[in-house]
Image (spheres, grey):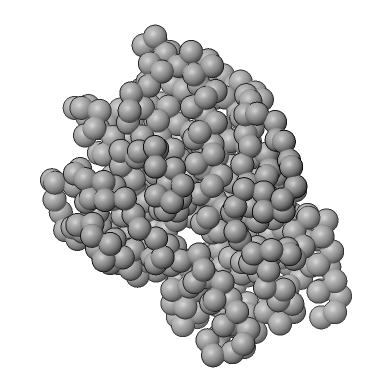
Amino acid sequence: MKKSVILLMSMMMSLSIGVVTTSCSFEDNPSGESVQLPAARITETIRNEEKKATVYNIEYPSADPNGNPVTLSGSIIVGDEVDASDKNAAGIVLYNHFTVFHKDECPSHGDLAVPMIVVGSKMIAVAPDYYGFGVTESKNQAYCISRANAQASVDALIAARELLKEKGYTWDDFLFNVGYSQGGQTAIGVLRLLAEKYPDIKVTHTIAGGGPYDIGETYRQLVSKEESTMPSTVVSSVLSYNEYFNLGVNYADVFKEDVLNRIPEYLLSKNYKRSELEGKLASNKFSEVFLADMFNFESALSKRFMEAFEKDNLCKGWTPRKTERITLVHHEKDGCVPYANATKMADYFEQQGLKVDRGITDDRYVDGKVFLCNTTGGVSTKVGEHENGAFFFAIEFMNTTCHYLGLKGWWYYPSAKDIEGF
């Protein structure tokens, strides 16, 4: 056991993810030191002939999970149809990516299958890498830390707008804020951040799917059920909240020894994709992953994590703007992110004065309206219900975009293969 702990901590130190000294404040430079970051810039221009699009990889100033200034990275995707229209786009899609583990799965390293869907719609996509990928891949990712990822996303949008102007692009006022799974959580985190700090950025419509908006409820339900279809996401949440909320927990008190041994190779190295992790990093059965105190919600150890989860709970503690238009998509049988996340998020919006529609409606595109799209079916693939929820998320995104842009039909038809990419 001692050897396992030393190995894990050694890997963490090499990745610069040791225990932090401050909790998540996200204030501008809380250390008080004067730090001048480079201005946003385009670092690479990539032509994609197959998709008929140009990708601009960017670096831009933002904040790390502790609020300190840092340079982050991401991508801008521009379809040829925008260039053919005198560089005028219909608007911008802020794409918040889902869970990734491999260093090459982030947008700036080429994993653009999902944001490429916008090509053909005359929309421009902006896709941040988040902290821990791209230019900061040597750092531990801020997995499901909604404030950190939302800040990275909003700053990417601000930087992209300036860089696009410099390239001669213009666009109409449509702004879609979208994401699935971790990206769904980030999308709602973006709304919270905009409400708190950026009153001039108006979102036309948010489509958030399968997100762990209440990370504590997610953990509580999965542990009570004693299994998850994606145990790597739970392990990653424990690691990120321990590091970025300064819990200082010894991982030897959290994980079974064989899982402890696997974390450096299979998770922290960022050499494995999510599909390659399941069955290698950890079992679906939590009894084979965690030690007893993690199952006992009354234990001091469990309470420390639950308190940290509660601090980043999107279902409390903020006031959404009354003009928001939101669609929540969630599969009722989701075995990775429990459906209760969607109902609790909808309930909170309702408490805050927004009107929540929990059924099928044609009146979902009005100010102050939340549409809860609870799905039960799926597509015929090898994926589970969490990914099947992504199919309906893609449909809602297509339908929503067509509504606002006045398109008579989809410009792109998502396939079962596309959905497996989620």
Q: Residue at x 34, y 45 (%)?
A: 206
State left or right for residue 21 relative to residue 56: right
Nearer to us in this view, 113 or 45: 45
Nearer to us in this view, 225 or 252: 252
Position of residue 310 relative to residue 380, above or below, is below
Q: Is residue 271 visible?
A: no
| Residue 49 place in picture, x, y as percent | 51, 18
Q: Residue at x 70, y 31 (%)?
A: 38
| Residue 377 place in picture, x, y as percent | 27, 58
Nearer to us in this view, 21 or 232: 21
State left or right for residue 394 relative to residue 292: left
Q: Residue at x 22, y 27 (%)?
A: 407
Q: Residue at x 58, y 76 (%)?
A: 305
| Residue 388 place in picture, x, y as percent | 36, 55
Position of residue 173 relative to residue 254, above or below, is above
Give the farthest residue toward the left: 362
Q: Residue 4 sits in which quadrant?
A: bottom right
The image shows a total of numbered marks equal to 0
Nearer to us in this view, 23 or 136: 23
Position of residue 243 relative to residue 91, above or below, is below
**Quadrant into which the N terminus falls:** bottom right
| Residue 186 place in picture, x, y as percent | 47, 52
Q: Is residue 308 visible?
A: yes
